[in-house]
Image (spheres, helix red, strand yellow):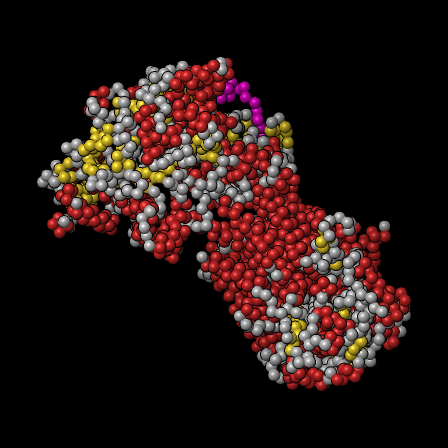
Amino acid sequence: MTNRTFTALAAALVVASCWIPVAQAQDSLYIPSLTYRTGPFSGGGTPFADGYADYLNMLNERDGGINGVKIIVEECETAYNSQKGVECYEATKDKGALAYSPLSTGITLALVPKAPIDKIPVFSMGYGLSAAAAGEKFPWTFVYPASYWSQMSSILKYIDANDGIRGKKIGFIYLDAAYGLEPIPLLDQLSESMGFTVAKFPVGVKEMQNQSSQWLNVRKESPDWMIMWGWGAMNPTAIREAAKIRFPLDRFIGNWWAGSHNDLKGVGEAGKGYLAANFSGLGQEYPALQDVLAHVVDKGLSKVSAREDVGNVLYNRGLFNAVVLAEAVRIAQDRTGKKVISGADMREGLENIDLSEERLSELGLPGFTGELKGSCADHEGGGSIFIQQWNGSDWEKVTDLIAPMSDIVRPMLEEAAEAYVSDKPDWQSQTCS
Amino acid sequence: MRSLPSLPHYLLRNAEQYANRVAMRHKDLGIWREWTWAEICGEVQSYAMGLKELGLCHGDKVAIIGGNRPRLYWSFSAIQSIGAIPVPVYADSVAEEMVYVLEHAGVRFAVCQDQEQVDKVVSVHDQLPGLSNILYDESRGMRDYDVQVILSIDAVQNLGRRALERDSHRAVQWRTEIDTLSGNDMCVMLYTSGTTGRPKGVMLSHDNLIITSINANTFDKLDVDEQTIAYLPLAWVGDHVFSYGQSLTAGYCVCCPESPETISADRREIAPTYFFAPPRVFESLLTAITVAMEDASRPKRAMFDHFIRVAKGYGEDVLNGAPLPLFSRLHYAIGELLVYGPLKNRLGMSRVRVAYTAGEAIGPDIFRFYRSLGINLKQLYGQTEASVYITAQPDGQIDADTVGIPSLDVEIRIADNGEVLYRSPGVFLGYYRDDEATASTRTADGWVYTGDAGFIDEKGHLRIIDRAKDVGRLNDDSLFPPKYIENKLKFFPSIKEAVAFGDGRDYVAAFVNIDLAAVSNWAERNDIVYASYQELAGHPLVYDMIERHIEEVNRDLAAEPRVAGACIRRFLVLHKELDADDGELTRTQKVRRKFINERYQALIEALYSDRDTQFVSTTVIFEDGRKGKIEADVTIRSLGEVPDMQMAS
Amino acid sequence: MNHARRWSDQLSEELGSGASAELLSVDNVSLSFGGVKAIADISFDILKGEVRAIIGPNGAGKTSMLNVINGFYHPQEGIITFRGKQRRRMKPYQAAASGIARTFQNVALFKGMSTLDNIMSGRSLKMHCGFLWQVVHIGPARSEEIRHRRRVEEIIDFLEIAHIRKQPVGKLPYGLQKRVELGRAMAMEPELLLLDEPMAGMNLEEKEDMSRFIIDLNSEFGTTIALIEHDMGVVMDLADRVVVLDYGRKIADGTPAEVQANQDVIDAYLGVAH
Amino acid sequence: MDILHSIFVAPFIDMGAYPDFLLQVIWEGFVAGVLYSLIALGFVLIYKASGVFNFAQGIMVVFAALVLVSLHEMGMPAWVAVLVSVVVMGLLAIGVERFVLRKLVNQHDAILLMATIGLTLVLKGSGQLIFGGEPKPMITRELGLPTGASDWEVFGGVVIFQHIDIAATVVALLMVLALAVFFSKTRIGRALRAVADDHQAALSVGISLHQIWAIVWFAAGIVALVTGIMWGARSEVSFALEIIALKALAVLILGGFTSIPGAIVGGLVIGIGEKLFEVYWGALFGSGVEAWFAYVLALIFLLFRPQGLFGERIIERV
Amino acid sequence: MLYREAGQFKTSYAADQALLPILQDRIGLSLILLVAFVGIPLLATDFFIGSVMIPFLVFSLAAIGLNILTGYAGQLSLGTGAFMGVGAYACYKLTTYFPDINIILLILFSGVFSAAAGVLFGLPSLRIKGLYLAITTLAAQFFLEWCFIRIAWLYNYNDSGAIEVPTRKLLDIAITGASATPVVRYLVIISVVTLMALVAANVLRGRIGRSWMMIRDMDIAAELMGIRPLRAKLSAFAFSSYYCGVAGALMVFMWIGSAEVESFDINHSFLVLFMVIIGGMGSLLGCFLGAAFIWVLPIIIRAVPQLIGLDLLAATTEHLTNIIIGVLIIFFLIVEPHGLARLWQLGKEKLRTWPFPYASN
């Protein structure tokens, strides 16, 4: 009998949870947050989610929301798993979600085609589909402030500026998954035009912490520079292995997902000199972050485990993600005159985003990042990055903003976007005047 | 409705009127095979033709030995259709018992179910000069017998079919021959299993069977839609009427189970609408229910007990359609949903419209239990000599203690000594080759002595007390109805069999046989350890329990003035089970009183002495046929106090 | 009425007259496991229609012999001739296909299946319906299934196990399991049926039943039977001829009476040291 | 021809040309192999004594290391943290015996395997719940484990030996020795060996099966802790390690489920084999072959020797 | 109690061997199908259809696949994820080359490729048994995963390395791609799953299914009954992998809409294995029960804190889900090692024998 009761209870719960009409956001701004605080990549997912939530909560606490409308942030755990990500999307989209930042290439790929159908923009900040930078083909997807390809071109520019890249051998070590494979077409293209050779070292997802053979191969190939597209436990392991084979770390550049505090904390002194790309500011010394500390963290409303974690690379990136969304909300409110906006309004807000130096200062983030100005055609915005270096205990910004090689990257992006759309006959595009 | 002259006429009628209705089912090789009336008629026709080919003539006797198999039922029709007389024989009787009947009836053919029966007949064939052929149904193991003499029913039918092919006129001839049958012709000869003496061949006419069958069908509104399951011995008049006579006259379907082990499963599958079972079956079913429920979880048992109490409360009223308050009806409806319905479903009785029990008295508790579940269980009183029906309970007039009002066309009279007499269209033609017995049983004006003592109560219902000749007197001249007492004892689940003594004695004493299933279960619950039946039977705590039961019976007896003097003073629990194999019971599981008197002389004497124990040694036959001895010191117990008659009354 | 006579009597007469054909012959077969000789140079034959017993003390190589006959072990030396075909190496399923069925010393039923399915499994070789028909389970697939079901029901009827038809075999009493296993082997309708201790662990009544089934099987269906059995009484009753093994060698071969009188056999059973 | 050349000739020329590098590859493989062996050792211990194929061994490695690191994070001195971790693994062993194994006595192998898969989920969930899911650096220095590296100049090149790798090898060796001594010299150890052969025999030594199970799980827990420390020191303590632990399954195939020497040899064969294959042949297949090499090697091996390196030949009986 | 079987008798072997010989079962299943085909599409929310029912059905199908191999043929496999991947990638390639052929046909055909992969990796099963075989199926898993990344042809050299599902239509209604509504996709999936479950049931009760169970229960005896072990095992691998392949294709084309290699990783193999264990080895019903349990339970666990107003961290819920599922697996193994299907079976038996605790006669 107990067994049947249990089954009945379970059934009732399913029914209850599925048939109860979802509360529509009537007088608030509903922003879902797809997080991964669990799973193999939780090390990166957690600070990002914290920064994201804290900033929006700070707006609620400090300003009472955006233009007086409260923001509701709802987290949904994906564990970096595409299926769960889609489930989170389905579970939250009907609650009036304004935009999604899935923080996972796999989930982004699944959501990109859904965005135009459900009329909710996808904002994959610096990840996902590079081609989505082409706004004409991807009206509903945004990759501000830079696509992977732009980033790669900037990194190569940095190498070229420091060492002269022609004739050099560049090693590319990457996570052997969609994310790591993304920049390869650009790398191949540029190696011809810039005259360098590429050696590729894939690291299997299961082998992230077991990279000795890759690095033995690196030692065998002995490239002049190494570029890494890594994530999670792959990063510290790679840096350790690099140190082990005595690869000069100041010639080892990680992309912006391979240069966080979490990655280097454990490596510590041994990682000194390691370089990484970044586009969001470092540290807590921005007025906005001070506000976050005062209004959220110190009030115990944050999930960060330690106060000093605020200002970390990924925390700030999550925060920046929220800043862009909040700004887009404001723009959308201005443009539509509505206080409570829809996903479609949000798309317009995102497309017309304009974070100038001045605006950033207003927001309490002076010099936090490069100028970001979107348009109908340009869903990448600025595209600039800077390079930071690990000093053994913290990151230091070592360059100014490096603009991408737009002249090469942009046509490639357009081409890729064209290819993506080509086999989808009823794909929704837009034309930009 | 005017009846047709003979049972084969009814077969022909059904083949026309109910041509495509299922007349018979048999679970064979895992599925229920079905035959329509038309098919059966065809089978019977070829069978009859084959029998004729083999030389069977009008008036010949044919033994039918076996279980409930379609072909054996067809044998009845086929034999009757050519004017020969079927003589069904109890299949479980041993060859020596069988030979008497076969010889007495002077059978020409024997139709056997299988090799086992064939072997029995073959083993005594030298004592049966008249026997010319043996037919069998199941061919397993039969391939090495002489095909000239011993042949399968299939082969006979093939013979018949060939004959029909040769000469199409034969079919017409067959029908004409059937038309020559008249209602007064002997239709079947049934040997009574006789508690005393040799079996007697009761000759029944077509009219006997047809009129009683039709009357019975009318009485219970049985029609062509009924389903019944044939599982009782073919040689017993009841089966012949329920599964053959009534089926033919009403046109309803008879289902034959796969094997004796699968009867309850088969009954569940078929879910008969019309069902007969002796009290024993109902008793053991109830015991099985009780035992099974002991193992149920506590809440379930509580629920079960609760609703059984509810059913006891107003189940009978619901069944009788008496007015009841809404709440009670609802309460009962819930019980129907949770307990009665499923229970009837498990018992295969969910579709029962009419169920009968007869042959012996049924425990009132048992009787009411089934009725309270909503099963329309009724009692009837009948005899072979009456083609079963003498009295039966009409719907709505049910009492556990009576056997109902006279059946249609039956007259009843009570003789001065209390013996019941009846007169009806079902009254038999006579005992075969025994005019003396016929004369002593049936008076010239057609009244038949039943041999049972009874009386008609104020509502016009007949009550049976005991066998007329068994009713004795104690030395103080008070009435001693042994069976009446025994039945009261046997109504306790833990008592399987009882034998009461007292005729010409100072007081009543009894043997008790415990019911192993019920008592061992009880023992288990009471942590009583025992190694054998004998040890359990002799256990002091078992004696205590039996003693309590007897005290209860005594209180009951004391309450009835007519039998108040027959309270039990001393008893013993027998060390072995009374067994038909040892001759202690008849094949129909009735106590052979005389035999027991002889066999257990020492024990009986001890009951009427002041001894506390008595040594006894008995010869028994084990299941594998070996003989052995069982010895025991049997404890005898006196009842402390016999209830005071005055107090009771 | 004296015509009723057992067919088996006729059979033994025929055997006596030597008219019967050789079904299987084992010639100079040897089998060893890593140096241990399980069977050493054994030859004997089995005639069509007979009941042949293989007896011997524990470890005599009886089961190994059966394993060789049905292809489970491959002898290092010797030749086996079955129905006139010689072979040295044969897969068990090929042996099954050529008409050899067997039962096992320790019941080897398919525990997860019902009695019915177990016996149906014996029909596997006789079922040929294609995959696509099975997918839809109509037409030939269904009629094939029903046809074989009927045959299986006859076996169930023969073995008197109708009441356990749909029960899972795992929970049946041992005696019934053995019966089901026999049924499964019967379902294969083999030319030669190998029974490895069909009555081991049975009580008297069960043994009698099983003996009856074996006799009926032999006489009704004419199945040739080779059986290993410890109960000498049973062997003497059932077997037409007996071969006696001891320590992997053949020490006697003949009718039950001959074998019983053989001094080597008596020694082997009494445990006289070799 | 080119393909054949690049498969059968070029790699060996390569090896010969840079023997120092070959040595380095072998050393790296050796160290990885030692760690595979350690995980496999945990499997073998439990399988031998209780017939349970402990799928949770991999997660136990992560869990043990995580406990250690987290305790230290909470401010416990390193060696105290080690002791407490040992106690935690002991409690885990007792818990597993008490609440899982004891209830599943006499169940089919596959069911016990499934139970340990369930255990994996529990450890994974509770580990992350209590200690958080992000990777944590191993407290190498605090434990007094060496860092740094030594160079060995040979064949005109250099082979780099990480001190932590040397330490891992030494610790693994000590561990195996300790287990050997434990099994052969102590009463409990002998009982454990007996139980692998015959449960009744073990009872006669006076130790209950329950105790024995708890002890082997405890031993496996300690092996897991050591493995966790060593592997953590090489990279980080993270749940991603769990997947690598699956490679120990391939090791077990090679070495046999019940053989400790088998686990060691199997681990080394796989460790060295996969590095050599990846470095010298991997490029032919597009790299990343390490992901499957161990399993495919095990599969091919099984086809020829189903009983493993050290298993006995199975004779089927009817 | 609910089962009232009195009066249900069979007059032919066909009826006796029917899939659902009991009337009440037939009624029950009809009701379930009615709800599934009519009730749910009409009444349920998109979330329920898209995130509960569709995944549930996809995993049920995969679980049927694995159960055929593991539960019926006794060959433990940890490569389910990869076989699903083969189906998905095959379907992607097929629809690339034959865009005009109906996608449902292509999905059904793509299973053939995973069946071929299954046969290939099933070959060792002739010599390898039990846990050893389980581990060699890991080789299939990892090798195929590697192929999915390394062979760019499989994903049409997409820059993302992932497959993206194009829109395909049936009768002018989009059934794949982002514009296909959940209801439409659901109807396609449930039709496919119902059909394939029926096919599985048919095959399992016939000669082929029996040969698998023979091999599972007693391989030696099976061989001596004339079953060719290689053929039986490989056919099980093929049939099982076919189901997994179709499930994989459905997963990508009808549910997620895109997939990279992570969608077919070892965790999926385990997920499906859990479903089979919890549901019950050797039971088709168990596949559905297990899939419901493993997929729906976490959704419920996630919903519970919200329903009772508890603000738990999403991650905490996730960890708790892991723990609860783990504990439940152990619990079920202890209480009923044969899974939910056996529990249902026992419950049904109770209902059939009600009010008796067991079938006494």
| B280 with respect to D301 (left or right) | left
User: In the picture shown, does residue E179 fall above or below B138?
Assistant: below
What residue is drawn where x is 61% and y is 35%? C139
The answer to whether residue B350 is seen in the rendering is yes
Instruction: Residue E19: name its quadrant.
Output: top right
Report x, y in % for residue C105: 50, 39
The answer to whether residue A217 is seen in the rendering is no
| B387 with respect to E101 (left or right) | left
Q: Nearer the viewer, residue E345 or B278?
A: B278
Report x, y in % for residue B510: 19, 42
- Residue D49 is one of the magenta-drawn residues: no
| E312 with respect to E118 (left or right) | left
Range shown magenta: C10-27
Residue with the most extreme left position: B476
Report x, y in % for residue D26: 74, 63
Report x, y in % for residue A41: 68, 69
